[in-house]
Image: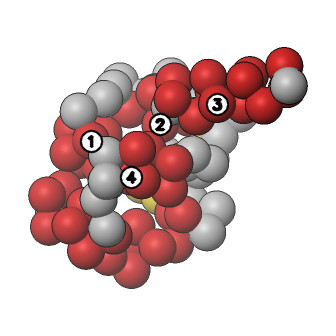
Amino acid sequence: MLTGTACASRGRWKLPHLKDWRLARLLTQDELAHKSGVSRPTLSRAEQGRFVYGASVRRIARALGVKPDDLLNAPETIRRAAILRSDS
């Protein structure tokens, strides 16, 4: 279930960290499109900050092995790297 509030707009969602998740899984847009069943242009638009329908978000999340709400936040590896950079 999608529970994020800041990104919802009439059943559509923004995925501000989708590219981070995709790269953390070492996938190209084409590979994620194939794995999720979501078109590459839709993934591209999502990575550019455009809205995506909830059904697509669930399919993308399943393909990445995460919960849909996880896509609203940066992957842990990205958060850890940001913390390490700020400590230097």
Where residue 45 appears, x then y in whole percent?
Answer: 52, 72
Q: Residues within 10 Å of mark 4 (few under 14, many from 20)?
A: many
Q: Amino acid at mark 1?
A: Leu
The residue singled out by tag 2 in the image is 71
Q: Verify CB contact (< 8 Å) between mark 2 and mark 3.
A: no
For disc 3, the marked residue is 81
Residue type indicated by callout 4 = Arg
Of residue 79 and residue 61, the one placed in the foreground of this image is 79
Q: Tell which tag, 2 or 4, sits nearer the viewer.
A: 4
- Counting from the top left corner in percent of width and height, residue 28 is at 31, 68
Give percent across and percent down for residue 87.
84, 19
- As measured in the structure, the alpha-carbon distance from the residue carrying label 3 to the one carrying label 4 is 16 Å
Which numbered disc flags the more N-terminal residue, 3 or 1? Answer: 1
Quarter in which the N terminus is drawn: top left
Q: Identify the residue at the far front of this view.
A: 88
Residue at which label 4 appears: 22
Q: Which residue is mark 1?
A: 64
Relative to 71, is 28 above or below? below
Distance from the alpha carbon under mark 3 to that under mark 1: 20 Å
Element under disc 3: helix
Q: CA distance from mark 2 to mark 1?
A: 9 Å
Of labels 3 and 4, earlier in sequence is 4
Q: Earlier in the sequence, mark 2 or mark 3?
A: 2
For marks 2 and 1, the one nearer the N-term is 1
SS category of the residue bearing label 1: helix
For the question of whether residue 58 can be seen, the reply is no
- Distance, label 1 to label 4, CA atoms, is 7 Å
Estimate the x, y position of residue 22 in percent, counting from the top left.
Answer: 39, 52
Q: Quadrant of the C terminus?
A: top right
Dot 3 amino acid type:
Ala
Q: Are marks 2 and 1 in contact (CB under 8 Å)?
A: yes
Foreground pick, 13 / 43: 43
